[in-house]
Image: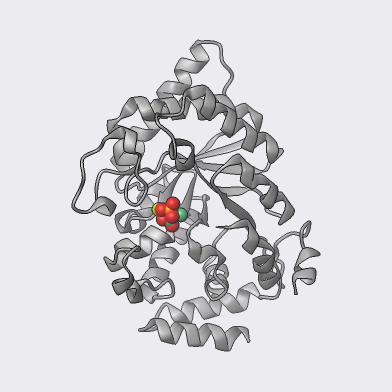
Amino acid sequence: QKAEWAKLVNEPTVSSDNHHVELVANIGTPKDLKGVIENGGEGVGLYRTEFLYMGREQLPTEDEQFESYKAVLEGLTGKPVVVRTLDIGGDKELPYLDLPKEMNPFLGFRAIRLCLEEQEIFRTQLRALLRASIYGNLKIMFPMIATLDEFRAAKALLEEEKQKLLSEGQKVSDEIELGIMVEIPSTAILADQFAKEVDFFSIGTNDLIQYTMAADRMNQRVSYLYQPYSPSILRLVKMVIDASHAEGKWTGMCGEMAGDETAIPLLLGLGLDEFSMSATSILKARSQIRNLKKSDMEKLAQEVLNMQTTAQVIEAVNAATK
Ligand code: PEP
Ligand code: MG
């Protein structure tokens, strides 16, 4: 099987009825690029920049960050690279920031919430990204967006830093797409409003499932509620994809679900445009998608949206794809 998959490294990801989707990778450092290229990744759908900030004593400088972003953009020679701005908090701590302990870290001061408050940290990252933008196809994505106001505030800071750089005579790409993670239910529910202002969505199912089910993703005792194929989750995913398409925008997914064998037929049927997963899953997913017929998966997706339980959905997917 592995040998069969290996033949697909340079093949496009198309369904049997010729619908094209993008298969891209989740990475944490420039070192991960080798795996992306070896496994035929068509780009990066999620560059988790937290790792630049972790395992050290102080914040990374603008130049250190610039070098990392530039390395990834150049390494992928013009292929799309979605860089997510700092998503610290929750399970990812930065000891040197000395933040107070919280009762509910996953519901607390994290990601974009922290960045909009600690603006110097955020502005430094934005400047590094803007400077790196001329070395490839950069897309910037904000994590944990819950309201339009947060998106607008983050975008305004990006715009300010861009103007500053330009007035200093630095070059910045004019073609940076700006998107958000959809990982909080409020944002999925208002996706039609967001779609008018963002360039793209990327659905973060690891958090979207946790927040929709109100079940801590790290807590074993409630892990039975972690149900990617629940019709509730699938309906949210559909709302987001449909809302983006109505505005001529695209939707990706960068949570674990995007690389999941049972989820892939459903996501194809729902019209997901970009699937971002660990590099080692890409060839298997490509092989799977090339054997699926999108029009059949659309019918399947339509059916499961009206089912009651996860078990019923799994059974329907198995029956339709065996
Ligand atoms: C997600 O929430 O699905 C996601 C991709 O982000 P992270 O796993 O880094 O929270
Ligand atoms: Mg997340």
The quadrant where residue 126 appears: top left
- Identity of the residue drawn at 34% across and 53% down: 187
Q: In the displayed structure, would residue 290 be above or below residue 62?
A: below
Q: In the displayed structure, would residue 212 be above or below residue 193?
A: below
Q: In the displayed structure, would residue 58 be above or below residue 196?
A: above
Instruction: Identify which residue, 67 or 198, lies in the foreground.
Output: 67
The quadrant where residue 7 appears: bottom right
- Where does the N terminus fall, quadrant-wise? bottom right
Q: Residue furthest left?
A: 103
Instruction: Identify which residue, 292 or 36, lies in the foreground.
Output: 36
- Where does the C terminus fall, quadrant-wise? bottom right
Instruction: Identify which residue, 6 or 31, lies in the foreground.
Output: 31
What's the colour scheme?
Answer: one colour
Q: In the displayed structure, would residue 86 be above or below residue 265?
A: above
Residue 203: in sight, yes or no?
no
* Picture coordinates of residue 259, whole percent (x, y): 56, 65
* Picture coordinates of residue 176, whole percent (x, y): 55, 34
* Picture coordinates of residue 185, whole percent (x, y): 32, 59
Tell whether 103 sits left or right of 164: left
Q: Residue furthest top?
A: 168
Tell whether 268 sits left or right of 20: left
Q: How many marks?
A: 0
- Identity of the residue drawn at 69% across and 64% down: 283
* Picture coordinates of residue 160, whole percent (x, y): 40, 22
Residue 230: in sight, yes or no?
yes
- Identity of the residue drawn at 40% across and 81% down: 310
- Identity of the residue drawn at 39% across and 73% down: 227
Instruction: Identify which residue, 160 or 107, lies in the foreground.
Output: 107
Tell whether 96 sits left or right of 29: left
